[in-house]
Amino acid sequence: MARPASPAFGANGTPPIVVEELSKTYKVTDREGGFGAAVRSFFKRKFKDVRAVQRVSFQIGQGEIVGFLGPNGAGKTTTLKMLSGLLYPTSGSAQVLGYTPWERQAGYLRSMTLVMGQRNRLAWDVPAADSFLLNKAIYRISDDEYKRSFQELDDLLELGPIIRKPVRNLSLGERMKCELAASLLHRPSVLFLDEPTIGLDVGAQSRIRAFLKEYNRRNGATIILTSHYMADVVALCERVIIIHHGELRYDGGLSELSRRIAPYKIISVHLGGCDDCALESYGVVLPGEDETGKKRLQVPADQVPAITARLLAEQPVQDLTIEDPPIEDVIERAFNEPLRN
């Protein structure tokens, strides 16, 4: 697929996405439970401010796939909704492909897409093919361009066997394939993906990740991805942005985050004929064993070579592996520590 022309690409070297001090505050009602409180609030309501996003700034270059991470309620979806034009910010600014998103100009809407894994954009009672034709009309895609786009998406996602079934009869994985295809028929240059693999089985997640990677490779598309599945992030993103309580906590490389917040390795070791050998002198012995029955040690990353040599020299080692800490642990720690790059 060829990328559609956009005023942002190549214009003064401006990145496709530039966000500066973006904030969103909601005013919500605040009352206690119970009938009396309900009656009182009918005559006099109390409100409180909820800061969903607070002065977030970042830039994303053309062709980058960036993981946008945070716990539930961190402000991820609110940020994506502002960048896609669904919400107005309280303050701050953003430029995507040279457009101000919440102005919702036609050129911008034809150049981006928002996919929310928990929201259905396909007509429920008709085949997905009918929703594709509706999008063709909405985006004014020519017949020839539609055929080319559909053929390429069909090659990548294997849509043929499923697009003529009513959407309600599709499995979740099949529906997400169709959701992605419907979102990409107009060949957007920027993709905002909010939990695109949520609820899918391992095989379906892997196929969706492979598709996104190939779409990015072919088109140079810029992608912001939110996901609670760290396998999505590891497979697709070299860079991550972490927000918590609406504030930016970290913006940088995923590998650098691991080095900074979890500067240790896990040594898994199987000792032949020595089930009760003392390992405390080599590192922190973690509770339990791994799936192969090895005992696990947490050791500082810079001491791994020396400790490994000691183990091999002093213990009856039958098998030994060295691994990075689980990415889930790294991200969880990042949510709760005051990191900022």
Image (cartoon, helix red, strand yellow):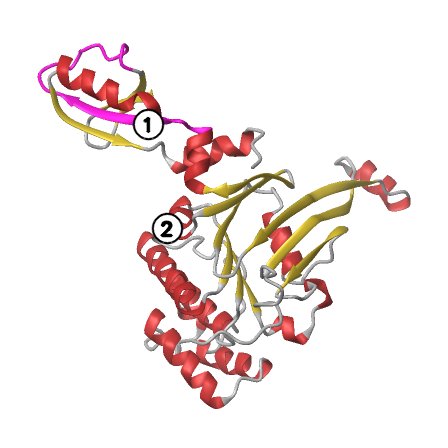
Q: What residue is shown at x 53% (from left), y 84% (from top)? A: 141
Image quadrant holding the C terminus, namely: top right
Q: Position of residue 336 (x, y in %)?
A: 55, 30
Can you name the residue that lies furthest to the right here? 43
Q: Alpha-carbon distance for marks 1 and 2?
A: 20 Å
- Quarter of the view holding residue 338: top right
The earlier-in-sequence mark between 1 and 2 is: 2
Q: Is residue 134 magenta?
A: no
Residue beneath disc 1: 265
Say which amino acid is labelled 1: Lys
| Residue 115 to residue 4: above or below | above
In the displayed image of the protein, which residue is found farthest to the left? 273
Please tell me in which quadrant of the rendered image residue 323 appears.
top left
User: From the viewer's perspective, is residue 66 above or below residue 288?
Assistant: below
Q: Residue at x 24, y 13 (%)?
A: 279
Residue matched to label 2? 235
Is residue 21 rendered to the left or right of residue 270?
right
Residue at the spot x=37%, y=64% of the render?
A: 214
Total numbered labels: 2
Residue 144 at x, y = what percent? 45, 89
Q: Quadrant of the N terminus?
A: bottom left
| Residue 124 in sight here | no
State the residue at coordinates (74%, 58%): 88
> Marks 1 and 2: CB-CB under 8 Å?
no
* Quadrant hosting residue 312: top left
Query: Most extreme residue toward the bottom, as rendered?
Result: 143
Q: Viewer-proximal residue, 128 or 124?
A: 128
Q: Going by the image, does 67 lie left or right of 162?
A: right
Which stretch appears magenta? Answer: 261-282
**Which sits in the foreground, 257 or 151?**
257
Asked whether the viewer can see residue 92, the reply is yes
